[in-house]
Amino acid sequence: MPKLKALFATSEVAPLVKTGGLGDVSGALPAALRAIGVDVRILVPGYKPVIAQLAQHRVVATFDNLPGFPPARLLSGKMAHDVPLLVLDCPVLYQRDGGPYQSVSGVDWADNALRFGLLSKIAAVLGCDESPLDWHPDLVHCNDWQTGLTPAYLHFSQGAAPSIVAIHNLLFQGNFSPETVSELHLPPSCYSINGVEYYGKLSFLKAGLFYADHITTVSPNYAKEIQKEPLGFGMQGLLATRRNELTGILNGIDTDEWNPATDPHLAKNYNRARMAGKAANKEALQIRMGLNVAPDIPLLGVVSRLTHQKGLDLLLEIAPRLVELPAQLVMLGTGEASMEKAVRDLTRSYPGQISAHIGFSEDLSHQIEAGADMFVMPSRFEPCGLNQLYSQRYGTPPIVHATGGLADSVVDCTPKTLGDGSASGFAFLGMTAENLFATIQRAIDLYHDQEKWKALRKNCMAKDFSWQRSAETYRAVYLKVLGRQE
Ligand code: ADP
Ligand code: GLC
């Protein structure tokens, strides 16, 4: 049996460029697939930091005459774990200061349809007879709306490989004006309900969900939730129709990158058998963040985009009551201006007890996972969520709203689950500030019972969230789509 070949098209890949979990997944899943024998190559746009970090590269293709698109080149490079990388170099579209999707001031790039139209188009070219490369993928694995048009382009190409679309977050759909259809040189006929049209717009994500051969999403529970209101965000009908071609696969984590025993960002390394280092990390975090150094006051950690999805407004609402308990709170995040302001205001009201860094900081995110006593994630919805997985690995029990992948990956602590060793955090249903407060209080009560708390932390650290099992499931989906057996 020849080796299975997959093109993994993505708009971000850690550590080169990352705004959230998609970057983490794109950095780790291809490596895990390669480890089980799948020949995966990653396609990513040549944003400024990507080109800057590309040590050695070769030009492997040029695209001078793609109708509707500026000239572009394909550069080849390597990621860690030897995963081959194809970088889509088109300076007028990608070489700018700011993020992959937005300017420095947080405004979406006005030409995002063209920027991700090109990414989608090139992924499709590489997956069909037109490809200038010698390497021809058996299948194209697309991720989120930014590569959602790939299955549509493939549908209208000769010799097209099948495609998969992975939904990481259905809230982001890439909807643009109807004129975009002709600007991106899609056939006018595809602008229909049986095609790319979605409530009077061209929707990149809808296109993917309609034309892809298979749809995956990042947890089994979220796969169910998106077939209904409200979490289907308008796509529930289509998703329910395609339920037999929809698979929820829980994300894994990069266990080298997120390993408290070796993590270079930590004040002191520790592992499940030797937990002593955790206290040193708490103290270092309290000092770094200007909190009162207090080993016995429970320290709650947050690392998150500060958006409505993440539900942190509830935490901010109850923060004054938490301080009274007492508890401390440390937050790292960026996002909506109003929420950033609310966080800053709280830190001013409670110096020494509530502290925050508004910004993106890889090392501080690791230090919070290690130094906090518990990790708070009250997301309104969460396709998978990675931080609750990192926090379990770091022996920092998560406190979560039982939705999406949070419900799939955190076992609520009760006398029974603590007794049988399955408990790994605290989960609540009913998205209210009162429920969140009661759950944090429940966690703090257990925290003061040292023996039980120790048992819970050990349970967390014993969990296996490595990518291997999920990679096997992706491979099974690939084989199913290809109608192959092994
Ligand atoms: P989402 O992708 O919805 O933001 P996830 O939990 O899947 O949520 O992934 C978020 C990822 O981004 C995690 O690796 C998290 O540590 C990281 N992250 C989020 N905000 C920040 C920040 N301000 N600084 C550093 N890392 C962050
Ligand atoms: C999205 C989701 C998050 C998920 C991540 C990676 O950003 O919001 O829940 O973990 O993608 O799949």
Image: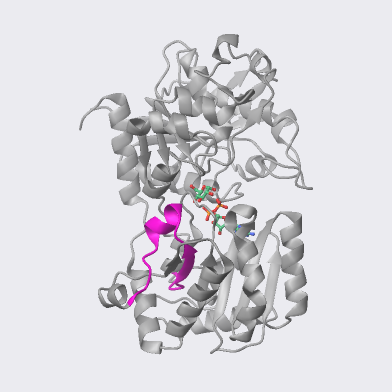
Q: Residue at x 45, y 29 (%)?
A: 238
Would you say 309 lies left or right of 214 here?
Answer: right
Q: Is residue 409 magenta?
A: yes
Which x, y percent locates residue 364?
61, 67
Can residue 336 be seen by looking at this rendering? yes
Of residue 56 and residue 400, the one placed in the foreground of this image is: 400
- Measured along the vertical axis of the image, is residue 290 above or below residue 222? below
Residue 4 occupies quadrant: top left
Of residue 274 and residue 309, the one placed in the foreground of this image is: 309
Q: In which quadrant will I find the N terminus?
A: top left
Q: Residue at x 36, y 56 (%)?
A: 466
- Measured along the vertical axis of the image, is residue 379 above or below residue 65? below
> Magenta region: which residues?
394-414
Q: Residue furthest left?
A: 486
Residue 253 occupies quadrant: bottom left
Q: Residue at x 53, y 19 (%)?
A: 193
Which x, y percent locates residue 249?
37, 45
Can residue 89 be seen by looking at this rendering? no
